[in-house]
Amino acid sequence: MTAIDPIAAWHTEHVYFNQLLSLLRKQLDVFHQGDRPNYELMQDIVGYLRDYSDQYHHPREDVAFERLARRCPDMELVLARLHQEHRVIAHTGEVLLRMIEAILEDAIVPREQLESALATYLVYYGNHLAKEEEDVLPLAAKELGPLDWQAVKDAAPSGRDPVFGERSSERYRELRRQIALES
Ligand SMILES: [Fe+2]
Ligand SMILES: [Fe+2]
């Protein structure tokens, strides 16, 4: 999220995350069809979401939520839930990532275990993004000012997006190629 047009930047990140979730969903479809999904790609997606979203996007949102809750007490519960969901997303993402890594190291992971972890992550994350888009962004556009946005940015100042950013990292080359194929 930048200070230039913070709402647009915030929304853009949600569009990116939804793109990644839809790529991940395709891998779940492959799995359902009985074929081998692209585990390397899955690892990149969940790894990126952990590294970027959990470390930068969510801490920034948490500051925005706090400031919004102070100004709109009737939204306090909704915002507290979304804040808690960040912890759940981080935890389920970590579990899923470990499962994928185990598979890549040739460990046996029961099919149902991977399937349910993946499906749960997709639904939970997708709902979380939808809720923010619907309830939080319009409110933030109305209620938050330049000082708030500065505090939001300062919550996680050095966030460089290694996939969608200008100076993207070599590590995610294949993921970027897959995203380009989709659009
Ligand atoms: Fe969030
Ligand atoms: Fe978000």
Image (spheres, rainbow, N blue to C red):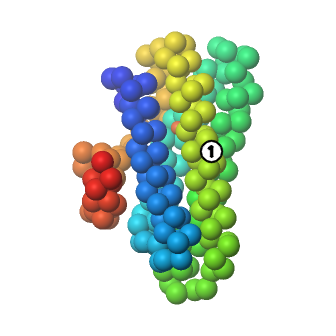
Residue ID at (47%, 77%): 36
Q: Position of residue 49 (x, y in %)?
A: 48, 53
On the question of residue 91 being in view, the answer is: no
Q: Is residue 158 left or right of residue 67?
A: left
> Which residue is found at the position 56% from the left and 69% from the top?
32
The answer to whether residue 107 of the structure is visible from this angle is yes
Nearer-the-camera pick, 11 or 165: 11
* Residue drawn at 56 percent across, 18 percent down: 139
Q: Is mark 1 within 8 Å of ligand 1?
A: yes
State the image coordinates of residue 102 (x, y, percent, origin top left): 56, 79
Q: Amino acid at mark 1?
A: His
Residue sticking out furthest to the front: 33
In front: 39, or 69?
Answer: 39
Relative to the observer, which residue lies in front, 23 or 45? 23
Q: Relative to 85, does residue 60 appear above or below in the rendering?
A: above
Sort mark 1 into few (<14), some (14-19) or many (20+) by Cα contacts within 10 Å: many
Q: What kind of element bears circle 1?
A: helix
Query: Which residue is under mark 1?
Result: 86
**Where residue 132 sits in the image (x, y, percent)?**
57, 32
